[in-house]
Every structure is written in C-alpha cells, then in structure tokens.
Amino acid sequence: MTDITIERVTEVTPEVYEAATRLTPQLESPSQVTITEEYLQRIVSNPNLHWLMARRNDDSKLIGMACLYMLPFPTNIRTSLENVVVDKGSREKGVGTALCMEAKRIAEEQGANGIRAAAAISNTASRKMLEKAGFPPDDVMAHYELWLRRGARF
C-alpha cells in the first residue's frame, strides 16, 4: 500500500489517544491494559520503545500501529515487534507489512542483529503478514510465556 505514511508517535494527542483506544481492542489480547492518556505517555516517554502508527494519506486517518521494543544487553540488542494491528476496514492492503518493514529499518539502523515477533499458530493473517515482511517461521525455538495476570490491568 503506497498511500500510507508510517510515523513514530512522539506525543499523546487526542488523535493518537482515539486511534489507540480504537485499535488496541482489535488485538484481542487476554492481558489488555486500560488505555489512559497517562499510560500512553509512559509508552511515548520510553526511550527503548518505538511506537509506530500508519496514517492513510487520503484522509489522514490513523489506521494501524506497532511497537518496536529495543533493549541493550551485554551480548546483543534484544528487539521485539509487538502489538501490530491494522483497523479492520484497512486490512489485507499491506499496512501491517509496511509497519513491520519500518520496524525492521529502525532496528537495523540502531544496530540490532534481529527482531523477534510472535503470532499464534491459529492467527494465519498475522503469520502471513510477518512472512511477507521477511520474518521466517521459527521451527527451531520453543517459545514460552508465563502470564502473571490475565484480564484488564491498571
């Protein structure tokens, strides 16, 4: 999709707040936090996190988002792509892939060796999007996740 712009969120505006509260529930996360302006401010003020949003050029509407988390360790820069979501009416048009490609560009620019991204086995749309963006399926590592809380938090 060439009629979108990917931008990094640097401040919590009413437009960003509206987009976050509209897009985040579409992730259908079992550990969803309550979105407040204060919580979003924590995101934009975190120097290790790049919060990206996709804007449709024809009407300037924010239609997708992704978070790239980069944390330096003695052995590498741990990089994780999280919360990639595209508004239901804008899916299957390359928006998610464009968000992933921008995250890859930023990670490479900042010296990361790789990026981790996860999609549930049953989420074929997310898996397809990640593969289009160049993420190979991982058949080497087993991924484990320990939930400390489930349900809405904060």
Image (cartoon, rainbow, N blue to C red):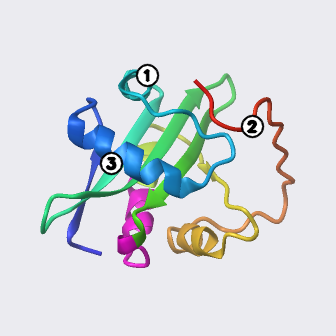
Q: Secondary structure at mark 2?
A: loop
Tag 3 residue: 19
Whichever of labels 2 and 3 marks the residue nearer the N terminus, that label is 3
Is 39 rendered above or below residue 106? Answer: above
Q: Quadrant of the N terminus?
A: bottom left
Q: Is residue 135 magenta?
A: no
Is 106 rendered above or below residue 132? Answer: above
Tag 2 residue: 150
- Label 1 crowd (10 A; few <14 / some 14-19 / many >=20): few
Tag 1 residue: 42
Please state the extent of the stretch shown in magenta in the rendering: 89-102
Could you tell me which residue is drawn at 72 percent across and 62 percent down?
120
Is 135 rendered above or below residue 2? Answer: above
Could you tell me which residue is drawn at 82 percent across and 66 percent down?
139
Question: In the image, 73: left or right of 48?
Answer: right
Q: Amino acid at mark 1?
A: Arg
Q: Please identify the dominant SS of the magenta region.
A: helix
Q: Secondary structure at mark 3?
A: helix
Q: Secondary structure at mark 1?
A: helix
Q: In which quarter of the view is residue 110 placed? A: top left
